Amino acid sequence: MHETIVMIEKLDAPLEKVWSALTEARELKQWYFDIPDFSLDLNHVFNFYEPGGENKFHHQGEILEVIPREKLKYSWGYPEFTKDHTIVCWELKARGEHTLLTFTHKGLENFKHLGEGFSLSSFQGGWKAIIEDSLKTYLEK
């Protein structure tokens, strides 16, 4: 069974501002994760840890697709726990002064063997906080 999260969010910010928030390392650090080696180059691999400095979970992604101001897709994995990965995709559409974000995280069944902390419900809660709280607050301030 495929486990996928899909969230659609209307953001009260112009498309250019949202795209920058999703693609600029200095902006990502403000609302998402500190990813110093982030780059939009196709097949670029980037690494980061959860906030707080505990560094319990090494996250690794690889840029899979970039359509400027429309789509950003990358893999999402935990190389110290599994070779399996999932796919995260951010798609944007301008709606006047606003931006419509469609967020997808698919393949979460690949992490089932890692335990409850990597469950669909855990990711749903995490993404809800990241998108509905952190991203919206950052963009709409």
Image (tube, rainbow, N blue to C red):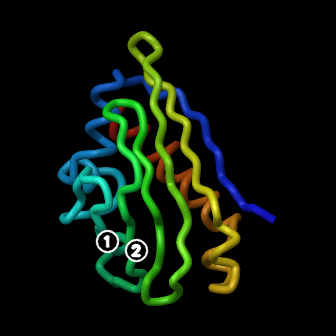
The residue located at (24%, 59%) in the rendering is: 38
Task: Give the side of residue 69 with respect to residue 29, left or right.
Answer: right
Task: Give the side of residue 130 with respect to residue 20, left or right.
Answer: right
Q: Is residue 82 above or below residue 49?
A: below
Image mark for residue 59? 2
Task: Give the side of residue 119 with respect to residue 76, left or right.
Answer: right
Position in image of residue 74 (x %, y %): 43, 57
Other-residue count near label 2 (Cα within 10 Å), few / some / many at <14 / 14–19 / ≥20 = some
Q: Is residue 91 above or below residue 27?
A: above
Going by the numbered disc 2, the residue's amino acid type is: His
Extreme residue in the right direction? 1
Q: Secondary structure at mark 1?
A: strand
Image mark for residue 48? 1
Going by the numbered disc 1, the residue's amino acid type is: Phe
Extreme residue in the bottom direction? 80
Position in image of residue 12 (x %, y %): 42, 23
